Amino acid sequence: MKTIMTGNEAVARGAYEGGLVFASAYPGTPSTEILENVVNYKDDIYCEWAPNEKVAMEAAIGASVAGVRSMAAMKHVGVNVAADPLFTFAYTGVTGGCVLVSADDPGMHSSQNEQDNRNYATAARLLMLEPSDSQESKDFMKLGLELSERFDTPVLLRMTTRVCHSKGLVELGDRVEMPIVKYEKNIKKFVATPANGKVMRKNLVKRLADMEAYSNTAEINKLEYNGTEIGVITSGISYQYAKEVFGEEVSYLKLGMTFPMPMDLIRQFASKVKKIYVIEEMDPYIENHLKMAGIQCIGKEVIPEYDELNPDIVRTAIFGEKEEGIKVGKEAVVRPPTLCAGCPHRGFFYALSKKKNVMITGDIGCYTLGSAPPLSAIDTCFCMGGSISSGHGAAQALKKAGNQNLKVVSVIGDSTFFHSGINSLMDAVYNKGCNTSVILDNRITGMTGHQQNPGTGYTLMGEETTEVDIPMLCQAIGVKKDNIYIVNPNKLDEVNKALEEAIAKDEPTVVITKWPCILKKFSPQDKKDFDLSPKKCTINQDKCKKCKLCVGVGCPAIHSGEKIEIDQVPCTGCTVCMQVCPFNAIEEV
């Protein structure tokens, strides 16, 4: 049977068909939907959201060692977090097959960088597969589990945003039930001490040679001979772009397994064509392998090495031609990213933006949009969990420089706090810091689409579980009870009072804003703890002086033209605009 699937759905299906038993992930676009679809097979596969990618990788490693097929899934920057166990896992090898799915994001659709994680395969010496469509996403996931066991290695399944989210026809198959390997103690294989590691390193060289031999004969490395003038070597989604641009007049070597690179097959292909183009997104990964082998090719001299490719970019780069698009008469209106109407972060950021002499270190999440005008209330953003630790460093540096009038406020979300912010807060407390840490608890993992986390009280599989108490956790780390403030972010007076008191103290302080994401499906606990009854605000035009202070809160429900109006459709009645209005022109209805 065939059905239409995204690449992420197909990976989940391939995991099911491949006999997967254990899956762990931390949500991150473009990888999030993989585990959200694996949970559809929870009768056969145990699956969970981990607090961060390192934990997800380690849990998958443990499951593999225990004798079952496992996987971890994450976006490309998550592999940075998971790299510590991953590199050693390549040395030890597996028991049950284990696949790491890295979803790269060329073009930075939802990421702070666009690193090319194919380089991880080379650095860590992992067998790597690159699907180019949904069918291959399913097939390669299944194949990856098989090859992992065959070559005693973790496998990197490298996806990209376009493959993850594009849809295509997928031929479904039956699940292969794999026998669970009985656990046996094997200290020399799985205890990575230096003495054992030296032996593992030698064994890894042999495994790499075996993997390369397989790569040169693997069916997923496909030769398509259509002539001898031009040959194109490509992989992943770039194959689709190349086919659309070059058509059927040239020969192709489509690489489905890109580490170890099938150099004998590449040499064979290169010997039969006069000119070779390498079409790949981002780094000259394939190109460098060719040039190190002395094979002449044209690659990044013409193909951009940043941003996402598409057929037009490739066509222009190779032939200097541009395809005429369809003219519709009018340009689409640009909508800048912004916090949603009724977002509980808006009131907090509005209050924070009014504070003077404050440096604001931010983190990864939808609250990063607090950096956008008109709020402009975040000054830095580097990585998950980095706001508190970078804020601590900044505060200590300012103190050392004698600039104690400039205070530091660090902003982090609840899921990100669980991810790696806990360690950062521990650093600030242990080293007697003085920055104020604000934990924006909107009761869910917001930006990636409302996944559960340790603070929501539910697991990925929908089971009720222990909810981590953030204030108690902060106390356990060492934050004084009197230095922890819990506020409703929609009440500006509460936020202002807490910020003023917290910032004034010369020791670690924590402000917790607690209100559920306005788009969340409210849990029974949410309905019990918060007044979530429907509300709306409207502007009394007789009282409105058009001062536009309400516009300054940055709510997309407020329209500014000849008169200031509130669109009743998106308005949620959070009342932040009403509190800002000095003329009482905004009323709750």
Image (cartoon, rainbow, N blue to C red):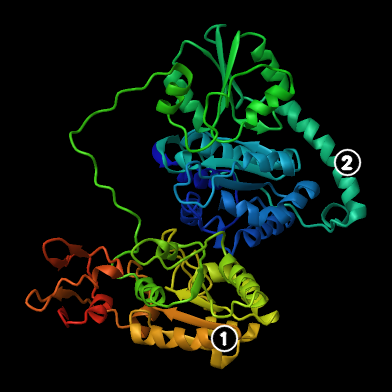
Q: Residue at x 62, y 51 (%)?
A: 79
Residue lying at the far left in this picture: please name it: 542
Q: Which residue is mark 2?
A: 202
Quadrant of residue 517 within the rendered picture:
bottom left
Is disc 1 surrounded by few (<14), some (14 to 19) or many (20+) residues within 10 Å?
A: few
Element carrying mark 1: helix
Residue 89 image offset from top left, x and y in percent: 75, 51
Three-letter code, disc 1: Met
* Label drawn at residue 472: 1
Measured along the vertical axis of the image, is residue 402 above or below residue 221? below
Residue 535 shown left or right of residue 387 in the figure:
left
User: Which is in the foreground here, disc 1 or disc 2?
Assistant: 1
Residue 300 appears in the rendering: yes
> If the image is split into quadrants, where does the N terminus sit?
top left
Number of residues whose C-alpha sits closer than 10 Å to that of mark 2, classed few (under 14), some (14–19) or many (20 or more): few
- For the residue pair 240 and 99, the one nearer the viewer reads as 240
Report the residue that reaches farthest toward the front.
Answer: 402
The residue closer to the viewer here, 460 or 418, is 418
- Amino acid type indicated by mark 2: Lys
**Label 1, label 2: how far apart the Cα atoms are:** 48 Å
Q: Measuring from the top left, give residue 227's x and y in whole percent.
A: 54, 6
**In what quadrant of the picture does the C terminus appear?**
bottom left
Q: Is residue 190 above or below residue 585?
A: above
Q: Quadrant of residue 556?
A: bottom left
- Please report whichever mark, 1 or 2, sits nearer to the chain's N-terminal start: 2
Residue toward you, 491 or 447: 491
Quarter of the rendering containing residue 44:
bottom right
Would you say residue 21 is visible in this rendering? no
